[in-house]
Amino acid sequence: MSEADDFDVVVVGAGSAGCALAGRLSEDPSLRVLLLEAGGSDDVLEVHVPAGLYKVWRTRLDWNYTTEQQPALDGRRLFWPRGKLLGGSSSINAMIYIRGAAADYDEWAELTGDKSWSYEHVLPLFRRMEDNIRGADRYHGVGGPLRVEDLRSPHPWTRAIVQSAVAAGYPRNDDFNGAAQEGVGQYQVTQRRGRRWSSADAYLHPAMGRPNLTVLTGALATRVLVENGRATGVEYRRGGRVHTAHAAREVVLSGGAINSPQLLMLSGIGPADHLREVGVDVVHDLSGVGGGLQDHPLVPMVWNVRSGKSLRLAESPVNLAKWKAAGRGPLTSNLAEAGLFTKSSPEQPEPDLQFHFLPVKFWKQAEIDPDVEAFSTLVVLVRVHSRGSVRLRSADPTWAPAIDAGYLTDERDLEALVTGVEKAREIASVGPITSVLADEWSPGPSVQGRDALRASVRDTLESLYHPVSSCRMGTDEQAVVDSELRVRGIEGLRVADASVMPTLVRGNTNAPTIMIAERAADLILGRTVDPALAAAD
């Protein structure tokens, strides 16, 4: 092995968190940083064209996971796209910039016993990472690596649905990441001049020229090396050979909520009985690894339209030329252009429902292209009570793990989603959107009453692709990492990605995942952030 195989920090996974972490760590010229990515380059047109996001699903750029059969969904298996390229899922997602509610982070602080995860303390990290087109204020920053913009060419139906939600009694909210989350409005997106702006764009590509940063693509991590209770490096496969990278200081797993627990278990770190069942030697019995999995479930609703054009034919030569020349037109759409946060009942302390409004037909997780002009509303549960798990199928690292999402195993989730469908129907029946919408295609006008809606929810429920908590932070026996992201019982090993979230945030998970990487960089570099900075202009 060459001496280039010796590093200070080895980061596994160049996704939303890994790109941010490697970029930040390599700002310290004294640190030798290695970033391993199983996938390849993000230099793909469909990655950069916002409206083309689903075109890369189920391709070589996607881990292309499928859940186990879900008993509450009549045995259906659900497709889970996960980015397998530089930028990870930030290179294939819908680019929605949402942090979640302030209460989410205050709950994290309570569950971890560490006030540095409270909203007051993480807000400076969000501001630091942000370059918001609207400028800096109490809640937002400028000059950071992650560009956040308003949609440049929103569809006219998007304005109509926002106005209809206001007519239905929901407050207008032009900033879901500001003083309050509740209400309806258009999303901000991680784009720059109408192009996707992934974590790789934001953090990694600007750092690629640094001599202390090595980035290897096509490198599948197979095992964390542990000696005398300390992580000393990573074994990985690349180019048909097995390689070893030594880490003098730390190994950090940033593979996400599926791959990070998988790699821990492949390394012998996890529930001992399960590891023995699949033929993995137990290095450290850590029962919480892979447990507590959470995801945001959604129910797709579709209406046929009276007239007008949806985004169905957005990828025309004219629109592609407009996007290439000016970064404008339908191809700049992230599909889910507007949203609503609200409560399923007045007893909820914070919103537990999120609605995505799409000026296009979105059905069967975009397995087939839209066939008619239509409008979709995705009813999403963002306060989830059900839990699932990630487990190994085999000791072979090339085997996909077994993903049990645990959808609707808690009846409260089903009831909230049924209420969400009822609310979506109310919005569709008032205001300017009524001149756009024709008949309800799904669930359909014959599906009336909560019993029928319960059955429909079970038949049509899909994933919003926000898995978290499979290596969660905490102080209890099932916690995998402590509040500083250190794996319990193993020195020199951290996890920094969505898997460490103690609970799901109320909203999309990409921005919180990048924030976790910012926090991890501070912890590794020994930096502190003054919460008073959150109040600075």
Image: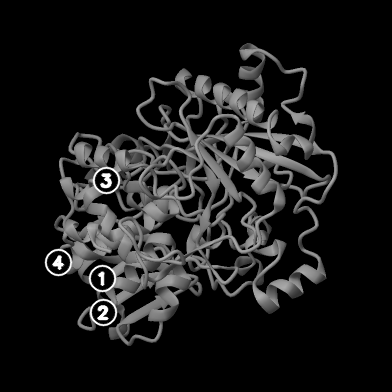
Instruction: Give the mark, 3 or 1, whose residue is nearer the N terminus.
Output: 1
Are dots 4 and 1 in contact, CB under 8 Å?
no
Task: Tell me where residue 104 appears, x and y as whole percent.
Answer: 32, 40
Q: Earlier in the sequence, mark 3 or mark 4?
A: 3
Q: What residue would you read off at disc 2?
A: 32
Q: CA distance from mark 3 to mark 4?
A: 32 Å
Question: Closer to the camera: disc 4 or disc 1?
Answer: 4
Residue 364 figure quarter:
top right
| First in sequence: mark 1 vs mark 2 | 1
Q: Residues within 10 Å of mark 3 (few under 14, many from 20)?
A: some
Give the residue type that dot 4 points to: Gly
Name the N-terminal-most of marks 4 and 2: 2
SS class, disc 1:
strand
- Front tag of 4 and 2: 4
Q: Is residue 225 visible?
A: no
Which mark is on residue 9?
1
Which residue does the numbered mark 3 point to in the structure image? Answer: 282
C-alpha span from label 3 to label 1: 24 Å
Q: Position of residue 176 (x, y in %)?
A: 44, 47
Instruction: Inspect the image, locate mark 3, and give the three-letter code of the amino acid beneath it.
Output: Val
Q: Residues within 10 Å of mark 4 (few under 14, many from 20)?
A: few
